[in-house]
Image: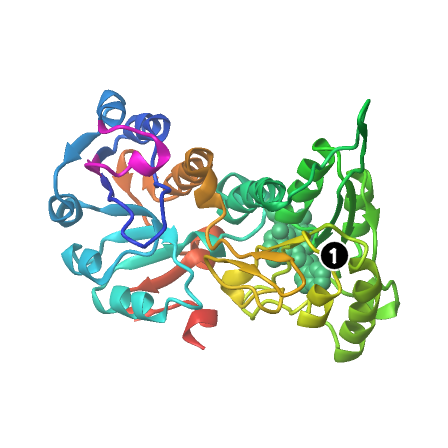
Amino acid sequence: VAIAVTRERREGEPRTAATPDTVKKLTALGASVLVEAGAGLGSSIPDADYEAAGARIAKDSSAVLSKADILLKVRGPTAQEISALKPGAIVVALLDAYREKDTVQAMAKANVTAFAMEFVPRISRAQVMDALSSQANLAGYRAVIEAAHTYGRAFPMMMTAAGTVAPAKVFVMGAGVAGCQAIATARRLGAVVSATDVRPAAKEQVESLGAKFVAVEDEEFKAAETAGGYAKQMSAEYQAKQAALTATHITKQDVVITTALIPGRPAPRLISAAHVASMKPGSVLVDLAVEAGGNVEGSKPGEVVKTANGASIVGWSNLPGRIAADASALYAKNLLAFVGLLVKDEALALDLEDEILKAAVVTHGGAVVHEGVKG
Ligand code: NAD
C-alpha cells in the first residue's frame, strides 16, 4: 500500500498529516510512505526526520500523487492534486464537506474515494480517530493564549507592594471540547471563569472545572440535547431569554470566548454588536466559530477587529494551526488509527459496511454518497 502525504496548499495551513512517529507506524502496517519535500516545515518537522522514520521524500507533488493508494491531508486536496490522483485512490482529510462542495464534486468526478475526518462518528471505538476533538481541544487552549496576548491586563490576581492587580473575568460560551479546554486554561492562568451552554449535561462539566455556570435553565433547556450529544437549534423564545441573560452578564466580563457550533448549520449568533458595545474598553472577544459565520457580530475571519468602545474581536481562522506542531502530532495520530481501518494484512481492504467508514465516506465509485452532503 502506497501512502502519500503532500504539502498543504491552502492558505494559512501550517499543519501536516503525518509525523515521523506516524510514518514509522504506517510503515509497520506494511505501507510505503511517500512525503512531498517540505510537507512538515510548518510544524517544525524537517524532511530528514521523515526519512529517518522510513519515508521516501519526493521533490514534487505529482510524483507523490500518481503513485498513491491513500492520500493523507489536513485540508481537502486542491483541484490540481485531485487531477494527479489515480482513479480509485483514497483521500482522507478534514474535508469541510458541507462547505467545500467544489472539492467534493471534483473528487467524485475523478473517481476518488474520499473520507471526511469530521464525519467520524463519536462512538468509543472511534475516539482515537476523533480529529474534531483533538483539534478543538488545542483551539480552546490557544483561544485563551490569544486572549491573554491581546488583553492589556493580567489574568491572575497579583498582590504586590505597589498594589493589587485584579483577576480577569473570563466568560466561555459553548462548553464542548474547545470550551472546556478554554475554561481549564483560563483557570490555570488565574482568571475568574464563568461559562454557558445549551446542553444541560454541560453544567456539571463546567462546574467540575471550577467555573460558574450561567444559563436560562427552563424546560426547553432541560430537553435540549440530541442523542449524539450535540446541541439542538434552540427556539427564538429561548434565544431571546438567553440574549437577555448574556446582556447583563457580559458587561461585567473582560474576556469572552465563544465556541458554539451546531453541526451542518451556521453558528448561532450569541453576541450582538450591542453586547460588544456594552463591554469595557480593553476587553477581548475571541470567536472560535468565525469560519462558520461567527458567534460574535462583527467578527472577521483572519482579523482582530477593534470596536469604537475599545474592545477587540479576535477572529483567527485556524487556531489549531497556531499551535501547529502539537495539532499535527495529534491529527496524524487520528489519521494513523483511521488508516488502520483501510489496511488489513499489509493490503488495502475497503469495507464500506464498517460503521465508521460508512459514516465518513463522502465520495465513492464516481459519485457523492454522503446523504448530508448530497442534500
Ligand atoms: P461543538 O463543537 O459542536 O459545539 C461547541 C459547544 O457549543 C457545544 O457544547 C454546544 O452544545 C454549544 N452550543 C451550541 N449552540 C449554543 C448556544 N446557542 N449557546 C451556547 N452554547 C451552544 O461541540 P463539541 O465540542 O464537538 O462537543 C459536543 C458534545 O460531544 C459534548 O457533549 C462533548 O462532550 C461530546 N463529545 C463526545 C465525544 C465522544 O464520545 N467520543 C467526543 C468529543 C465530544
Residue 226 in view (yes/no): no
Residue found at x 42% / y 38%: 324
Taking the image as shown, residue 351 lies to the left or right of residue 33, namely right
Image-quadrant location for residue 18? top left
Image spot of residue 242 (x, y percent):
80, 68
Image spot of residue 170 (x, y percent):
74, 47
Taking the image as shown, residue 5 lies to the left or right of residue 216, namely left
Magenta-drawn segment: 34-47
Quick one: which residue is furthest to the front in this view?
A: 162
Q: Residues within 10 Å of mark 1 (few under 14, many from 20)?
A: some
Q: Nearer the viewer, residue 141 or 86?
A: 141
Image-quadrant location for residue 331? top left
Badge count: 1
Quadrant placement of the N terminus: top left
**Dot 1 lies on which element?**
loop
Quick one: which residue is furthest to the right in this view?
A: 218
Residue 280 in view (yes/no): yes
Three-letter residue code for mark 1? Lys
Taking 183 as reference, is 88 above or below it?
Answer: below
Q: Nearer the viewer, residue 71 or 255?
A: 255
Q: Which residue is mark 1?
A: 280
Image spot of residue 100 (x, y percent):
37, 66
Q: Nearer the viewer, residue 252 or 262?
A: 252
